[in-house]
Image: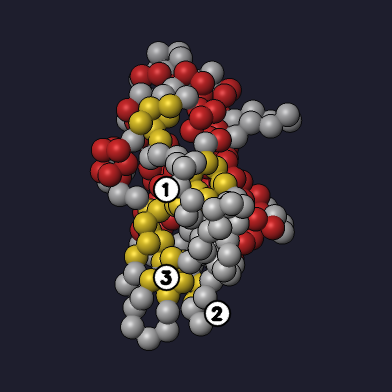
Amino acid sequence: MSFLAASMRLYRAGSIAEAKRLAATIRVLVHDTTSSRSLLKQMDVKDKLFWISSGSVDPANLIATFNLALFDTNMRSFTPLPAGFIEEIGVAVDFETWWLEPVMKDVWGDMFSRKDIILALANKEGGAHVDKLQRRMRALAREGSLGLSMEPGPDALCFGGAVELSSGRPVEPAIPSDGLVVASPLPASAATITTEIYNTLTNQWPRLHPDGKDWDLPAREE
């Protein structure tokens, strides 16, 4: 929890790369594999918590969707959802729903979960390992597959990728040829996921006391 809070302070101060360390910490907290168990799993609390979700992709929505970030047209970058907004709109779900539900959809119809985002940053982008991103994640992180670009000259946000209803595939390139691909949505999304986790754990702090130990509640994220 202290690592999450420290990295969030640095992220908000402008160190976007801290999103990779957020992802590595989140991986330690919640991600299980056949050969390793997460910290919350070892504590036997992960599946007993109600996880705060800021929402998932509406399958009826044909356009690209990003539920865990906002786009700042002045900064030309993605920003995380404010903690107060998450608290206001958040719904309680079980862990598997929270971890695996689609929270982002690009113009090609590819869906991305919190698990996809966190493991891409932690396992591929340098949080704990460096490796090649899979095609669809590379398109999201590096090639602007959300279809957002900023036109040269006056600030004009383009939300690209017109969809052909019969096939559900884009009929135009995701990024206009004269546009500028915007920054990756992954760091801001990781910051939003961090706030969801922080609120989930602090709101249910007594559940983290399997031995009745009187732990101090960590400072709440603002």
Task: Name the residue: 36% across, 76% down.
Answer: 156
Please tell me whether mark 2 or mark 1 is closer to you in this view.
Answer: 2
Q: CA distance from mark 3 to mark 2?
A: 12 Å
Find the residue positioned furthest to the bottom: 153
**Of the image marks 2 and 1, the number of the one nearer the N terminus:** 1
Please name the residue that numbered disc 1 is placed on: 67
The total of numbered circles placed on residues is: 3
Task: Name the residue: 34% across, 78% down.
Answer: 155
Secondary structure, mark 2, is: loop
Please tell me whether mark 1 or mark 3 is closer to you in this view.
Answer: 3
Contact check, label 1 and label 3, Cβ < 8 Å: no
Instruction: Classify 5 as above or below 164.
Output: above
Secondary structure, mark 3, is: strand
Packing grade of label 2 (10 A; few <14, some 14-19, many >=20) is few
Task: Name the residue: 32% across, 72% down.
Answer: 74
Find the residue positioned furthest to the top: 211
Q: Which mark is residue 177?
A: 2
Q: Looking at numbered disc 2 in the image, what kind of residue is underneath it? A: Ser
Contact check, label 3 and label 2, Cβ < 8 Å: no
x then y, percent, for residue 37: 64, 28
Please name the residue that numbered disc 3 is placed on: 158
